[in-house]
Image: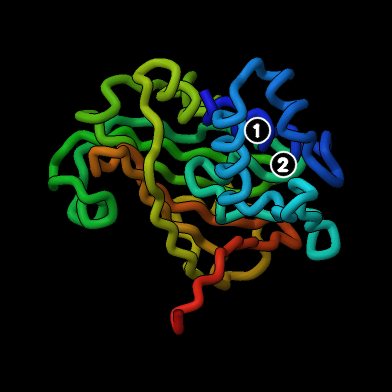
């Protein structure tokens, strides 16, 4: 239950419902009819996602990114982080959908066997009507039994959660600069032939199995990447 509360509060924060501070624990307990322990777990999730700073004795204050950029991608969110962009959610247009055998390159990226069937989904995604990114994602069929282009036009992760009770446990993200593959050149209106900001992501279930891996090319102007870390004193 606390995951659902945390997700709703995250969406509310990104939508600007709480510009300064979250409601008190007691207010949230009453609103969601939940125990204090459940609310605190939800707040811990939001804090770990880098959306609030915790002030002892005062509460949770929303971190304002407006001074850095009008488009901030919060990498601390991890699972399905690109669906939780300020000003979103993103709107998707599916440009390619197929069930294909995993090539050697895909097998290395997704920790699957060569030849394993994987759903390939290529989407253009838009923020406030402007092209935000091109996402090329893959879902092993042995883990995700059914997927369709219609489903891919919405939130795939929401579908997986509602249909298969499938929720990501951990995510590995690798940020790099890469040239856009020639096969996608006509889909993206980029200036020049230089590299683009690229994010490779691998999403794992609690069992350690990969249920999704992706490569995303970003083109949104002024995009800022944000990380939230908790400092550890290694000398202690």
Percent of width and height locating residue 78: 50, 49
Residue under the point 56% across and 55% down? 75
Element class at badge 2: strand
Q: Is residue 162 above or below residue 5?
A: above
Visible in this render: residue 171?
Answer: yes
Query: Dot 2: within a 10 Å radius of its alpha carbon, few (fewer than 14), some, or many (20 or more) residues?
Result: some
Q: Percent position (x, y) of residue 135?
A: 50, 46
219 vs 82, nearest the viewer: 82
Q: Quadrant of the C terminus?
A: bottom left
Determine which residue is flagged by label 1.
91
Task: Place residue 166 in its image quadrant.
Answer: top left
Residue at figure coordinates x 61%, y 31% from the top left:
39
**Label 1: which secondary element:** strand
Q: Position of residue 215 (x, y in %)?
A: 44, 52
On screen, residue 162 versus residue 71, left or right, reads: left
How many tags in the picture? Answer: 2
Q: Is residue 95 left or right of residue 126?
A: left
Q: How far, Cα to Cα, is label 1 from label 2? A: 7 Å
On residue 132, which mark appears?
A: none
The answer to whether 114 is drawn above or below residue 41 in the figure is below
**Measuring 86% from the left and 46% from the top, which residue is drawn there?**
20
Say which of 9 and 56 sits in front. 56
Q: Which dot marks residue 127?
A: 2
Q: Is residue 76 above or below residue 145?
A: below
Horizontally, residue 209 falls left or right of residue 150, namely left
User: Looking at the image, do the residues carrying marks 1 and 2 touch, with CB atoms under 8 Å apart?
Assistant: yes
Please rate how many residues cluster around mark 1, counting C-alpha atoms within 10 Å: few if below 14, some from 14 to 19, many from 20: some
Asked if residue 61 can be seen in this view, the reply is no
At x 41%, y 52%, the residue is 201
Question: Where residue 54 sits in the image (x, y, percent)?
Answer: 70, 53
Mark toward the start of the polypeptide (1 vs 2):
1
In depth, the one of 56 and 135 nearer the eye is: 56
């Amino acid at each position: 239950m606390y995951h659902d509360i945390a997700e709703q509060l995250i969406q509310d924060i990104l939508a600007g419902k709480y510009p300064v501070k979250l409601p008190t624990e007691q207010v949230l307990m009453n609103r969601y009819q939940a125990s204090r322990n459940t609310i605190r777990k939800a707040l811990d999730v939001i804090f770990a996602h880098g959306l609030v700073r915790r002030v002892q004795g005062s509460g949770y204050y929303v971190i304002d990114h407006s001074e850095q950029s009008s488009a901030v991608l919060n990498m601390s969110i991890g699972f399905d982080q690109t669906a939780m962009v300020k000003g979103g959610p993103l709107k998707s247009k599916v440009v390619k959908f197929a069930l294909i055998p995993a090539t050697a390159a895909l097998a290395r990226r997704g920790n699957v066997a060569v030849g394993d069937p994987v759903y390939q989904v290529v989407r253009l995604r838009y923020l406030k009507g402007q092209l935000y990114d091109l996402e090329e994602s893959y879902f092993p069929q042995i883990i995700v039994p059914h997927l369709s282009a219609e489903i891919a036009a919405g939130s795939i992760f929401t579908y997986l959660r509602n249909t298969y009770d499938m929720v990501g446990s951990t995510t590995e993200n690798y940020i790099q600069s890469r040239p856009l593959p020639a096969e996608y050149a006509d889909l993206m209106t980029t200036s020049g032939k230089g590299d683009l900001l690229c994010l490779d992501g691998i999403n794992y279930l609690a069992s350690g199995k990969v249920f999704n891996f992706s490569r995303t090319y970003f083109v949104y102007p002024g995009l800022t990447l944000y990380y939230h870390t908790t400092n550890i004193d290694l000398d202690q």
